Amino acid sequence: MNIKEKIKSSRVYFDGSMGVMLQSLGLEPGELPENWNLTHPEKIVNLHKAYLEAGCNIISTNTFGANKLKFSNLDKVIESGIVNAKKAVSECAYMGEDHYVAFSMGPLGKLLTPFGDLEFEDAVDIFSDSVKIAAKNGVDLIIIETMSDSYETKAAVIAAKENSDLPVFVTNVYDENKKLLTGASPGAMTAMLEGLGVDAIGINCSLGPKQMRKIIPELLENASVPVIANPNAGLPRAENGKTVFDVGADEFAAVMKEFAELGVSIIGGCCGTTPEYIRKMIEVTKNLPFKRVSDKNKTVVSSYSHALYIENEPILIGERINPTGKPLIKQALRDGNFDYILSEALAQQEKGAHILDVNVGLPETDEVKMMATAVTELQVVVDLPLQIDTVNTAAMERAMRLYNGKPLVNSVSGSEESMTQIFPLVAKYGGVVVALTIDENGIPDTAEGRLAVAERIVRRAAKFGIKPKDIIVDPLALTVSSDTGSANITLESIRLIKEKLGVKTSLGISNISFGLPNREIINSAFYAIALQSGLDCAIINPFSEDIMKTYYSYRALRGMDENCVEYIGFASGKSERKAYVENSEDGAGESLQNAIVKGLKERAFTIASNLLKTSPPLDVIDTQIIPALDIVGRGYEEKTVFLPQLLMSAEAATSAFRAVKAVLPPTDSKNENKIILATVKGDIHDIGKNIVKVLLSNYGFYVIDLGKDVPPEVICAEAIEQEVKLVGLSALMTTTLPSMEKTIKLLRQKAPDIKVIVGGAVLTKEYADMVGADCYAKDAMEGVRYAEKVFSENE
Amino acid sequence: MSFLVQTVNSPPGSIKSDIAETLRYLGYGKHAPDTDTAALIDECIKEFNPVISPRCCYIRVPVVISSDSVELGFGEIKSRSLCKNLGGCDEAWVFAATIGIEADRMIARYGKTSPSKSVIVDALASSAIECWCDEINRMLCIDLKCRPRFSPGYGDFDIGHQKSLMSLLDTAVKIGLTLTDSMLMLPTKSVTAVIGISKNEDMQNDCDICLSCDKKSCMYKK
C-alpha cells in the first residue's frame, strides 16, 4: 500500500533521532553527518534497521542537511543516503510490515529575503536540486522537517511539488509561544501547507513532548490532513560526559499515547529518541482505535503570522491600495515610492481592516514586477493577510508564489477563459478565490441567474481539486441610481448563494452608490442590509466613518461583541489611544516652526493646513518649515539636539510638506536635484540610509532609494539612467567595504562626473579615501551639507 | 570532549533593554532626552519589550593555546587577542545568542513609517542583546572563574570565524541564527562569543565586555 493510502487507514510510525545517535557512534563536532552515508554506510544501515525493528514504518534518510550549499558531491551523498535506507528496508522485509523511505530535507541555514540574503527563488532552486536527485533514486515520500521559517518551508514544498510526484509531509519547529521562529502560528502553517497540497503536516524537534501539548490541539482543530508529531526526548544535558535527555522512554511513550488518543495519526521521535523510545511508543499506541481525519471545512486565509478564519464574523477588506481614482497612489506607483503604499497599509490596519486588497495595475507600468514588490514589501510591515487583486494572470502567479501564506485571490469569473487561467494557480499555490457572478454573457439580472453562474464556477473548480470552502462568491453590487432594483437582486443573491451552495460571500460595497451624492450614507446602509442578508466579507474603505459605524454597531447588536467593548472603544473615540499624545488639538496659537522643532507630526500637519488657508505655500515653506529644519539641524551639529529628536522634527516637517503638497499644483516631475541612495551589495542594514533619506527629502532633494544589498551594476546603471549628480552609499560592516569600493570604481569608470558620498558605522575618513569616495559624512546632517554644496556648485 | 550543544531560551519580555545604554547608543552621552523624545522612547519600549524572544545555544570546549593560535576542540583559531583573552584558561564556553527576528521586523517597519522610532527601537534592541548576553554570562559562569566574553571581530579575532562557531553550535536549527555571505548575522541583533573558563582561582568573574577590547577611541566605551 502506498503511503498516501496507508495514512488514510491506519496510524503510521516515524523513526527517531538520527543526529544524536550518530554522535554517540562517533560523529565528530563540526563533522557533517551526511558524509557518513559514504564513509560509514554500515552504521547508517544498522541505525535504520534498529528503528525498523523497533516497529516504525517510515525511516528518514540521512540527508537532512544535504543541499548544494554544503555539498559539492550532492549526488553521491543523497544517492548513498537513499541506498542505505533501502538496504535497511530490504533487510527488514522478513518483518512483513509496510516500510517506507522518506527523503529528509531540513533548513538551508540561510534566512530568506526580505530579511535575509537568500532570494526565494534561489531557495526553491537549491531544494529543487536535492529533490531531483531523490526522485531519480526513488523514495516513497519527502519529509520536509525542522523548518522554523514559513517562507523557507514554502520554498521547499514548491521545490518538492515541481520536481516530483512524491507525497510531501512537513513538520515545523514551534517555540513555547506556539509560533515558528519567524512568527507563524500552527493555524497559519496549516492554512498555507494545505493550500500547497501537502499530504500531512505537523511538528517536530522543538521542545519535549510535554511542551507540544499546547500546539497539537491547534493543528488537529484546523488540519484536514493527518497530523504528525515527532518530538525530542525533552531537553539535553550533560551527565558524566554523556548527553542525556530529560524525558525517559516510558514518559515519552505516555505522552505520545495522549497525542494518538487526541487524533495525531503519524507519530515518531526526533533528537534523543532512541529505538527504545520508538518501541515503547508503538507498544502503548498500537491497539488504540485509529481516528480518520475529517475535512474541517474552514474558509481560511493566512499571513506570515496568523490565520484568518472567515466564519461567523464580518470581515473587512481594506480597499485603499488601488490606483483607481487615487492620484497619490498612482503617483507613488509611477515613482516606485512604496513608502506611501506601506503607510496606507498600516493606516488601514490601525482602522481595523482584517485583510488588505492589493491592486497595483497601471497601464504604463510593469505590473508583474510591481505586484511582486508590493506583496514582498507589504509583508515586511503588515501582518494582515493580503487579497491579490489583478486581472494580469502573470502578476497573479508571481504574487501567489511569493506570498508568505495563503492569500485571497481576486478574482475569477464564470467565463471559461478566466477559470482555466486562475484555477490552476489556486490549485498549485493555495488560496481562497473570489468568484464573480459574471460570465461570457455578462451579469445576470436575477438572483437565480447569479446563483447559476456561481454554481457553475463551484462545479468547475472541483475539477481542479478546489473545494467550495476555498471559494468566496461575489454576487456584484451594481449602482442603484441606474436601476433601483439592483440592490435587491444583489441582496437576494447573497441569501440564495449561501443557502444553495454553502459558500462564503463578498461584495465591493461602494459600487452601489455611483452617481449619488454623499455616497457614504447609502454605502453604510447597504452594508448593514448586506450583513443582515449573510454577507461575510466586504471590500470597504476603513477610513469611512459611516462604514465603521455600521460595522461596530452590527457586531454589538448581533451579539458578536462581548459587553460591547469594541463598540464602546470605537464610539467613544478612544480605541487604542497612543501613549504618546499630542495635547493641543488644533494647534491654535502655536507656530508651525515650533511644532516642527518639537517634532510633533500631527500638529505640524494641522497647523500647516490651517496656515495654508491664508498664506501662499511657498511662504509657509520659506518662513516656517525651512527655518525650523535649520534650527534643529544646527542644534544637531552643535550636539544640543540628538538623533531621535532630529528625526522627529524631520517627520514633522514631512507631514507639513504633505499639507503643502495638497494645495500646490502638481509640479513637473523632472527633478534637477536627484540623489541616489543605496546600501551596498552584501549589506542589509538600512537604518542609516533611511535617516539620510528623510533629511535629504526635507531639504528639498529628490531621493531615489535603491534599497539595501544593491549590486554595483544596478547602482551604476540607475545613476546613469536617472542622470543624478550625487550617489550616497552606506555600509555597516568591514566585510561589505570591498563591495562599496567596487561600486565606486564602477561609477568612476562609467560616469566619472558623478560625486560619491559614503557613510555607515565602520567608515572613517581614511576608509572613505581608501575606497575612493568624494566625501565621508559622519552623520546625516553632514550628508545634507555636502549635497547642498554639490548642487550649488552645479548651478 | 562532550559533544553537547545546549539551548536556553528566556520568555518574551523577560529581558529588558538598559535605558542608559540605549541613550548612549542614540548619542546622548550623559545628556537627558527632552520630554517629547522621552515620551517617544517610552512608547517604543512598550511596543518593543514584548517582541524580544531571547534564545541561546552553547557548548563547553577545551582550550589549548600555542603562541599565537588557539585550539578550541573543533578547529584552530589564529588570533593574538583571543590568545591573550584566553590566557590561563583550559576550557571555554562558546555561545550564540539572539533576540529574534521580530526586532528586525519592527525596525524595518518603522524604517518605512517613522525613522525616529526606527532608530530608537534599533538602540533598544542593541541594548537588549547585550543584556541577554550578560544574563547568559552570569548563568554560564556560576561557580566558575570566567573571562569577559570575546567575539569574532574583536581585536584580530577574524570575523570569518563566526562561520565555524555557528556551524559548531548548529545555530540555524537550534536558535534560528543564520549568516549571510558577507558574514552578517541574521537576526541582526545577535552575538557569537567565547568565554574563557580560568583555572586561576582569583580571576575576576566579569561581564564587562569593554574590558576585553583594546580600542581606545570608541564612542560607546563605558
Image: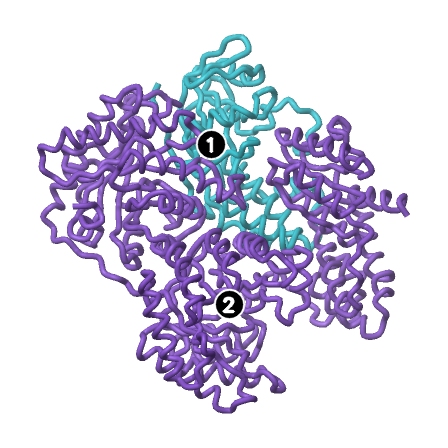
At x 59% / y 48%, what residue is drawn? B121
Q: Quadrant of the C terminus of chain B?
A: top right
Query: In the figure, A125 relative to A265: above or below?
Result: above
Quadrant of the image occupied by residue A458 = bottom left
Give the residue type that dot 1 points to.
Answer: Ala
The chain whose colour is purple is A
In the image: residue A144, left or right of residue A348:
left
| Labels 2 and 1 positioned on one and the same chain | no
Give the Cα distance between marks 2 and 1.
39 Å
Q: Pick the residue in front: A645 or A658.
A: A658
**Mark 1, secondary structure of its residue:** strand
**Residue A51, horizontal then vertical, whole percent:** 18, 33
Q: Which mark is residue B96?
A: 1
Instruction: Check residue A353 in the rendering and tell me which mark sits there, or answer none.
Output: 2
Q: Residue A638 vs residue B101: left or right? A: right
How far from the left and from the top, in percent, is residue A438?
45, 76
Q: Secondary structure at mark 2?
A: loop
In the foreground, A717 or A732: A717
Mark 2 against mark 1, which lies toward the viewer?
2
Q: Position of residue A761 (x, y in %)?
A: 67, 35
Which residue ends up furthest to the bottom in the rendered image? Answer: A484
Q: Chain of mark 2?
A: A
Is residue B176 toward the left or the right of residue A588 in the image?
left
- Chain hosting mark 1: B
User: Residue A499 shows which numbered tag?
Assistant: none
Residue under the image location 62 percent in, 63 percent down: A362
* Residue A606 left/right relative to A229: right
What residue is drawn where x is 18% and y is 57%?
Answer: A292
